[in-house]
Image (tube, helix red, strand yellow):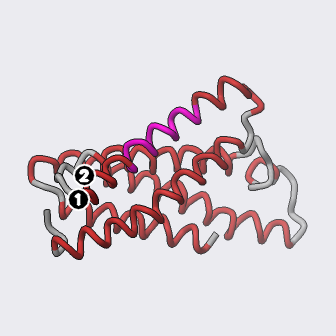
Amino acid sequence: MYPGILVVLAFVVLMNCIHHSAPEDKKVFSQVGLSFALISATIIATDYFIQLAVVQPSLLKGEVDSLSLFSQYNPHGIFIGLEDVGYLMMSAAFLFAGMTFVGPGRVERALRWIFVVSALAAIMALIGLSLYYGAGLEYRFEVAVLAINWSVLVVSGVLLSLLFRRTGGTE
């Protein structure tokens, strides 16, 4: 949980860097992306902190009455739902971040493609898995969106470091 909290906070910083470096005519997109990043970080950090500060101590003390709804091990619990919406908001942040990369370079095109396609993939995963599994969706979308978003964070982190190194942090 601790690394997860740190990553979502670092994601907000990353989106702020993207906003700061965006061309003036694309700042509205980066601002919307930053807003979705803040929503995502708030939901996910709160979700993970509840696991650390409430669920784990309660389990250790044997206080388990009505706790299953909050546990990360309940496939129909609040934890999964909050994580789903938090990472979906991260995907929305990716979509708008992708719209800020308009340069002709290969790195800019790759970033635009990765951000936009990953956001669309997350939305399609939610729709497809929801239609297929219905009320049995459980943790399936969580696993899919985590795989998509964490892959994007790794790849885009490398590409953004190349871009910011080349441009000095400004487009």
Q: Given contact means CB atoms under 8 Å apart, are the residues at marks 1 and 2 in contact?
A: yes
Write down the quadrant of residue 159 in the picture.
bottom left
Name the residue: 40% across, 44% down.
92
Which residues are the magenta region? 114-126
Sequence-earlier tag: 1 or 2: 1
Name the residue: 17% across, 57% down.
22
- As drawn, is 2 to the left or to the right of 105? right
Q: Which residue is mark 1?
A: 19
Q: Secondary structure at mark 1?
A: helix
Q: Which residue is mark 2?
A: 30
Residue 86 position in % (x across, y down): 52, 49
- Identify the amino acid type marked 2: Ser
Structural crowding at the residue carrying mark 1, measured as other residues with C-alpha within 10 Å and reported as few (<14), some (14–19) or many (≥20): many
The quadrant of the rendering that contains the C terminus is: bottom left
Q: Is residue 103 above or below residue 18?
A: above
Q: Relative to the observer, which residue lies in front, 124 or 137?
A: 124
Q: Relative to the observer, which residue lies in front, 136 or 82?
A: 136
Q: Is residue 136 above or below residue 49?
A: above
Q: Is residue 125 above or below residue 2?
A: above
Write down the quadrant of residue 67 in the picture.
bottom right
Residue 154 position in % (x across, y down): 48, 65
Q: CA distance from mark 1 to mark 2?
A: 5 Å
Name the residue: 56% across, 60% down.
46
For the view shown, which residue lies furthest in the right direction?
62
- Identify the amino acid type marked 1: His
Residue 53 position in % (x across, y down): 67, 70
